Image: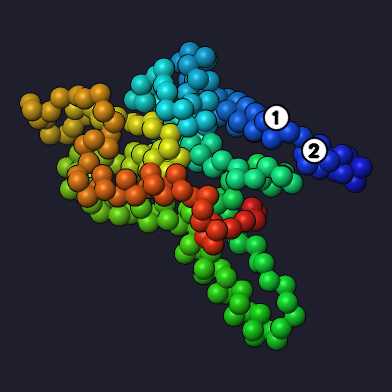
């Protein structure tokens, strides 16, 4: 077992960055495709195309987002999050880096100094709070909450188009710099509006100015996330 593990780590650490990137994106795209394919009669190639597009932040689509169920939109949201987190360094890549560094639930402590028990507990508590507050996922949750507040009127009046899932999808798409959107359908409005017409632009085009400004911040935040050296450190998956 140790020999196999050593060989695996040797291959990972000596493989060229190109092949590691290719392997990662292929695996994530294939897994995404297989999940999207469950109970779906859509063309297999179109589903794989959509999975690859979401994973590689290509912002291209051969299908309307309206054909996907809520479960499939959740899968695509995860794909955008995984694909949008480009590895900042491929040197010494380990297996734990196949998952984004921000999908953590318990932060890994960096300090192992021998100090009094009370001091250790205080430091650990402070570290947990710091990582929870400054982690990338926490920022995204805050952004989603803010947008839900700015779009609260639309959430109430037009719940089929304006729902939390669509907002989360849009935020993750902006964060991963993907560009996919669920779109907006006038036929789904509970209160018909003769002045409403379907447009080619995405769902965020129907947002208020305040919501658009928040999404602009999300796009900048997603593009510059690799420079955030304090928040979103390595997290341990349980």
Residue 62 in picture, x, y percent from top left: 41, 17
**In the image shown, does 14 or 202 lie closer to the viewer?**
14
Residue 19, label in figure: 1
Left or right of 51: which side holds 216?
left
User: What's the residue at 27%, 37% (across, down)?
Assistant: 204
Q: Is residue 189 visible?
A: yes
**In the image shown, does 145 or 61 lie closer to the viewer?**
61
State how far apart marks 1 and 2 are (Cα): 11 Å
User: What's the residue at 43%, 37% (across, down)?
Assistant: 177
**In the image shown, does 160 or 148 lie closer to the viewer?**
148
**Quadrant where the C terminus is found in the figure:** bottom right
Q: Earlier in the sequence, mark 1 or mark 2?
A: 2
Q: Quadrant of residue 175?
A: top left
Question: Dot 1, how many residues are within 10 Å of its Cα: few (below 14), some (14-19), or many (20+)?
Answer: few
Residue receiving disc 2: 14
Is 125 located above or below residue 169 in the figure?
below
Question: Dot 2, how many residues are within 10 Å of its Cα: few (below 14), some (14-19), or many (20+)?
Answer: few
Query: SS class of the residue under badge 1?
Result: helix
């Amino acid at each position: 077992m140790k020999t196999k593990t050593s060989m695996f780590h040797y291959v990972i650490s000596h493989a060229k960055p190109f092949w590691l990137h290719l392997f990662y994106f292929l695996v994530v795209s294939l897994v995404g495709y297989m999940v999207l394919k469950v109970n779906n009669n859509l063309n297999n190639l179109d589903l794989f195309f959509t999975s690859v597009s979401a994973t590689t932040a290509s912002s291209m689509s051969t299908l309307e987002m309206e054909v996907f169920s809520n479960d499939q939109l959740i899968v695509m949201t995860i794909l955008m999050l995984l694909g949008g987190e480009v590895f900042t360094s491929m040197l010494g890549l380990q297996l734990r880096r196949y998952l984004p560094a921000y999908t953590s639930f318990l932060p890994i402590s960096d300090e192992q100094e021998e100090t009094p028990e009370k001091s250790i507990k205080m430091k650990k508590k402070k570290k947990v709070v710091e990582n929870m507050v400054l982690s990338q996922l926490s920022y995204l949750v805050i952004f989603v909450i803010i947008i839900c507040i700015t779009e609260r009127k639309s959430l109430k009046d037009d719940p089929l188009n304006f729902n939390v899932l669509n907002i989360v999808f849009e935020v993750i798409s902006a964060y991963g710099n993907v560009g996919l959107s669920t779109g907006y359908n006038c036929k789904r409005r509970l209160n018909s509006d003769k002045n409403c017409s379907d447009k080619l632009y995405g769902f965020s085009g129907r947002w208020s100015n305040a919501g658009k400004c928040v999404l602009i911040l999300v796009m900048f935040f997603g593009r510059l996330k690799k420079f955030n050296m304090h928040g979103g450190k390595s997290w341990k998956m349980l």
